[in-house]
Image (cartoon, rainbow, N blue to C red):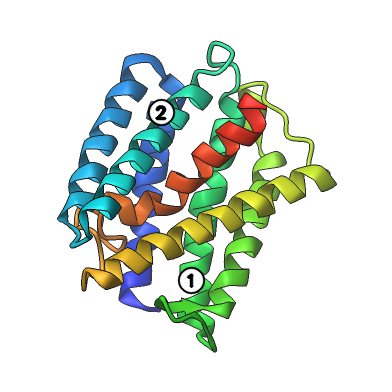
Amino acid sequence: MNSDLIKRILSSILLVPLSFFFIIKGDYFFNFFLIILLIISLFEWLKMKNIMIVKFTGIIMIVVSFYSVFQIRYFNNGENILDFLIIVIVCIATDLGGYSFGKILKGPKLISISPNKTIAGFFGGFICSVLAMFILSHSTFLKSYNLIIDFNLSFLFYIISISLISQIGDLIISYFKRKSNLKDTGNIIPGHGGILDRIDGMIFVFPTVYVFKYLF
């Protein structure tokens, strides 16, 4: 198995439970966690060699995204934590699935702006996100918090939509990394790179979900 893939999996095993701790605890724990991620994300974005208008647009997008994260987490006094967890898990599973399928199966490239992305990885992202949510919906983890997922056709469409937006966000950030001659936005997370490399899809998913599901 590819060494980067192993690092990626091990990092996820460590970071996912830690992230879930802050998400579920909420209040000061979550707010502190969110502020740290925001600061690092902005720093990594500003390191990239983009023209000023792109830098400014990126800053606005990141800030709006983190605002959306905050609003969704505390929507209805924090009672909507299940939807927040669904978004995070689908994005993580999409990223891990895309990377794993792409590295293992290889095959034709997906798009020129991100030469490492493959068609196998593209569909792998969908497969892993659906599989992850199917497993979660039948797990005792949610039941222990009295949270229930109705895994029906509309929910399946919701998963695929989140996964698609996440992959588009990944491609957009990859494009700007390539323009800046960067493989990763940082090296803080083994196997992943920087924080932006980890949350690039989420940056686009959270504002989209917030606008179309919560504001309307």
Residue indicated by mark 2: 67
Q: Is residue 78 left or right of residue 130?
A: left
Q: Residue at x 79, y 36 (%)?
A: 150
Q: Residues within 10 Å of mark 2 (few under 14, many from 20)?
A: some
Q: Is residue 141 visible?
A: no
Q: Residue at x 38, y 70 (%)?
A: 5
Question: Disc number at residue 100?
Answer: 1
Residue 44 percent coordinates (x, y): 21, 51
Q: Please tell me in which quadrant of the rendered image residue 173 appears.
A: bottom left
Mark 1 and mark 2 lie on one chain; the one further toward the N terminus is 2
The relative height of residue 137 versus residue 72 in the rendered view (above or below) is below
The relative height of residue 206 versus residue 191 in the rendered view (above or below) is above
Give the CA distance from mark 1 to mark 2: 31 Å
Residue 73 percent coordinates (x, y): 49, 24
Which is more toward the observer, 94 or 19?
94
Q: Residue furthest bottom?
A: 107
Which is more toward the observer, 51 or 66?
51
Q: Please tell me in which quadrant of the rendered image residue 54 appears.
A: bottom left
- Secondary structure at numbered mark 2: helix
Say what amino acid the circle numbered 1 marks. Answer: Ser
Which is more toward the observer, 49 or 92?
49
Say how many tags the image has: 2
The relative height of residue 178 versus residue 132 in the rendered view (above or below) is below
Which is more toward the observer, 161 or 23?
161
The relative height of residue 79 versus residue 101 in the rendered view (above or below) is above
Say what amino acid the circle numbered 2 marks. Answer: Tyr
